[in-house]
Amino acid sequence: MSIFTFQTSINLKQKHHNPPNYKPPLKKFLSTFFIKNSYKSECQFLPFIPASQSVAAVVFGQTSPQSRLYPLTKRRSEGAVPIAGSYRLIDAVISNCINSNISKIYALTQFNSTSLNSHLSRAYSGGLLTNREFLEVIAAYQSPEDDNWFQGTADAMRRCLWVLEQHPAVDFLVLPGNHLYKMDYQKLIEAHRNNKADVTVAVLDKQRNYNTSFGSFNVDFGNRVIGFKDEPNLIDITALSINNGFNEKLSSMGIYVMNRHVMIKLLQESFPTANDLKNEVIPGAISLGLKVHAYRFDGYWEDMRSIEAYYKANMDSTKKTNINYNFYDRDFPVYTLPRHLPPSLVGDAVITDSVIGDGCILNRCSIRSSIIGPRTRVGDGAVIEDSVIIGSDIYQSEPERRTGGENLKHMSVPIGIGEGSFIKKTIIDKNAKIGKNVKIINRDNVQEANNESDGYVITSGIVVIMRGAVLPDESIL
């Protein structure tokens, strides 16, 4: 079986990659930026250099194979999970970069990455990015030097240093690609440079009582990080110093800014076998006495830690007031793939407090407080409440709709929501076939159930219909 590296450079100028042992010279503006062999912070920062010229972003599509959004991630990575009718989760992070004028972006992907790679390559070529900007997808690969796949975030960055080093960045901004939030990364970079920090970590403000999956940092009165603790794994680094007894615990967002030379030294020299940034490299930097600072973020942030959190974020997008995340913000827009679909066709339908994607065909139905994704067909008399319908990849022809396509076992069950069906508090993944007079109401109030063989699971009381599942006519869940 042949193994190859998949790399897509989205740039008007063709990029040529050099072999892993190639070390390009730094640009002239880096000539005053240096760090000595000791880990004492000696960096000479140039705060006036715009981030667009001196910062490169590294975005991870998914940081581990154990996804919290399963079964939505059975065939896609977390970053590729659709949200709010038209977007993917990773669009929020890429849009933050674009809106923050950070135009050099590397997307490192591995788990179920086909859909994500395709989306990034198609969405961010041409119009959004100019010839001075690029988004480059670097998929996990095997090589003569290393026949393993990426073993974690730190291993992935170490393996890709030969690509990252080609961009003369002063700092690298490391971002998970599956979180929903809006942040001006320019302010984060400015704080990093003003503090003359080696590493800056983004943390939730103390008013937020939120235990993230990225652990927590002990922070002194000057926002200097003096310790780290990962609750699930009981990893605890004793504080190096506590000034005047002040020691504040703040939750990590998994967002890091690392000085170029510090990052390379940490990955290649100090922790050459470390696999994970969160549990190994960042705590290691603290233990070595590097200057690690915390940047407090007090805005809305959701790390999609569960199906319940994903469902709530979608429901929030249908609200007119008290919006946690605004997809309609003119000053901080969210970008995604233009699909070039026709406008939605609405018959004698009653639609309230809902988001309707492009290319839908909605007949005499009722839709309330729901997300209806692209190309969704809803039959006469169907009722959809408090649900997320992700949509369809294709339009079926009329002969296919009459026969149910190629699946003879389920004759006459086409893609979409059949006539007379009632759906409540449900997530329906792509290309699902819901027959006529089907009821998805969790009638027994089940909180957790795994019925993948029947095409659905229930988590936190939310029914999730799997991608491509078929529910015959008259089915009741």
Image (cartoon, grey):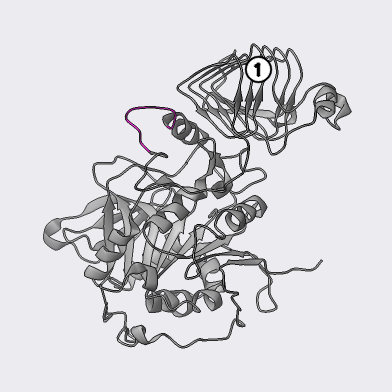
Label 1: how many residues lie within 10 Å, few (<14), some (14-19) or many (20+)?
A: some
Count of marks overlaid on the render: 1
Quadrant where the N terminus is found in the figure: bottom right
Residue 205 image offset from top left, x and y in percent: 26, 47
Name the residue type under label 1. Leu
Residue 230 drawn in magenta: no
User: In which image quadrant can residue 283 be found?
Assistant: bottom left
Q: Is residue 264 something that shows in the picture? A: yes
Q: Which residues are magenta?
A: 317-325
Q: Mark 1 highlights which residue?
A: 477
Q: Is residue 450 something that shows in the picture? A: no
Is residue 229 toward the left or the right of residue 136 in the image?
left
Is residue 241 toward the left or the right of residue 54 in the image?
left
7 over 92 or under it: above or below: below
The secondary structure making up most of the magenta span is: loop
- Identify which residue is drawn at 70% across, 12% down: 437
Residue 472 image offset from top left, x and y in percent: 76, 19
Quadrant where the C terminus is found in the figure: top right
Q: Nearer the viewer, residue 110 or 325?
A: 325
Q: Secondary structure at mark 1?
A: loop
The residue at the far right in this view is 408
Q: Nearer the viewer, residue 278 or 171?
A: 171
User: In which image quadrant can residue 29 be found?
Assistant: bottom left
Residue 218 image offset from top left, x and y in percent: 27, 56
414 over 135 or under it: above or below: above
Q: Nearer the viewer, residue 11 or 54?
A: 11
192 over 429 or under it: above or below: below
- Identify which residue is drawn at 52% across, 75% down: 161
Residue 91 image offset from top left, x and y in percent: 49, 49
The residue at the far left in this view is 244
Residue 324 drawn in magenta: yes
